[in-house]
Image: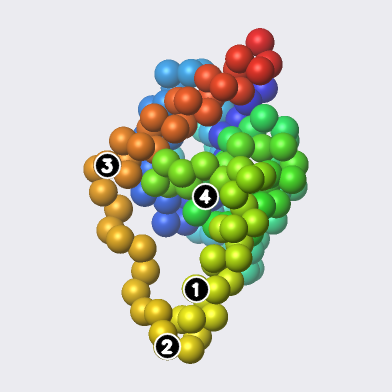
C-alpha cells in the first residue's frame, strides 16, 4: 500500500501532508532526529532515529518501497529513494525524477563548493504561501498518478 515518508526535521508542510493523507486514506511515517508532535491517527507514525548524521535518511531508504512517496529537500536522499522506485517531492512542490536528479546533485555540489570559497552566501528564498499551494497540488497529483498506475 502506498505510504508517505516525511524527512521531518525542518519540513514546513507536515500539516498539509497529514490533511492530504487523511483525505486519501494513506499512512504517513514521520522520521525525525528528535521527538516532534504528530496528530493522533492510527495511520500516522513517528520514528525517532537519533542524532547520528544521515540517520533519518538511512532509515527512510531502508523502509521505502516502489510507489511510496518521500517528502524531502535532501537531494542525496532523493537520489537514493528514486533508485528504489519511490516518488520524491520537495517541500516547495518540486519533484525529483530520474531526468533531473543528476543535475540537482551537480548543482548541489557546485553551490557547496562556491559556499566554501565564500562566493555564495545565503540560502533559498523564504518559504511562501505559493510554495505551500504548489506542494499540495503536486502531492495530490503524485498520489493520483501512482493510484492510476496500480489500480
Residue farthest left in this picture: 129
Relative to 105, say whether 143 is above or below: above
* Residue at 32% in and 40% down: 132
Q: How many marks?
A: 4
Residue on which the image places disc 3: 130
Q: Earlier in the sequence, mark 2 or mark 4?
A: 4
Local crowd size for mark 3, using a 10 Å CA cut-off: few (<14), some (14–19), many (≥20)? few
Local crowd size for mark 2, using a 10 Å CA cut-off: few (<14), some (14–19), many (≥20)? few
Residue on which the image places disc 2: 118
- Callout 3: SS: helix
Residue 6 is situated, as x and y percent measured from the top left of the image, at 53, 44
Observer-side mark, 2 or 4, equals 2
Q: Earlier in the sequence, mark 1 or mark 2?
A: 1
C-alpha separation, residue under disc 3 versus residue under disc 1: 25 Å
Q: Which mark is residue 72?
A: 4
Q: Earlier in the sequence, mark 2 or mark 3?
A: 2
Q: Quadrant of residue 113?
A: bottom right
C-alpha separation, residue under disc 3 versus residue under disc 4: 18 Å
Q: Earlier in the sequence, mark 1 or mark 4?
A: 4
Relative to 21, say whether 36 is above or below: below
Amino acid at each position: 500500500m502506498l505510504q508517505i515518508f516525511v524527512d521531518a526535521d525542518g519540513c514546513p508542510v507536515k500539516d498539509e501532508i497529514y490533511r492530504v493523507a487523511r483525505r486519501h486514506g494513506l499512512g504517513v511515517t514521520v522520521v525525525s532526529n528528535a521527538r516532534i508532535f504528530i496528530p493522533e491517527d492510527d495511520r500516522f507514525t513517528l520514528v525517532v532515529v537519533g542524532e547520528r548524521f544521515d540517520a533519518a535518511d538511512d532509515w527512510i531508504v531502508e523502509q521505502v518501497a516502489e510507489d511510496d512517496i518521500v517528502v524531502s529537500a535532501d537531494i542525496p536522499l532523493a537520489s537514493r529513494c528514486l533508485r528504489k522506485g519511490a516518488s520524491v517531492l520537495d517541500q516547495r512542490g518540486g519533484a525529483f525524477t530520474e531526468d533531473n536528479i543528476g543535475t540537482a546533485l551537480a548543482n548541489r555540489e557546485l553551490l557547496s563548493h562556491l559556499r566554501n570559497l565564500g562566493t555564495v552566501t545565503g540560502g533559498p528564498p523564504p518559504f511562501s504561501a505559493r510554495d505551500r499551494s504548489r506542494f499540495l497540488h503536486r502531492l495530490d497529483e503524485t498520489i493520483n498518478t501512482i493510484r492510476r498506475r496500480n489500480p
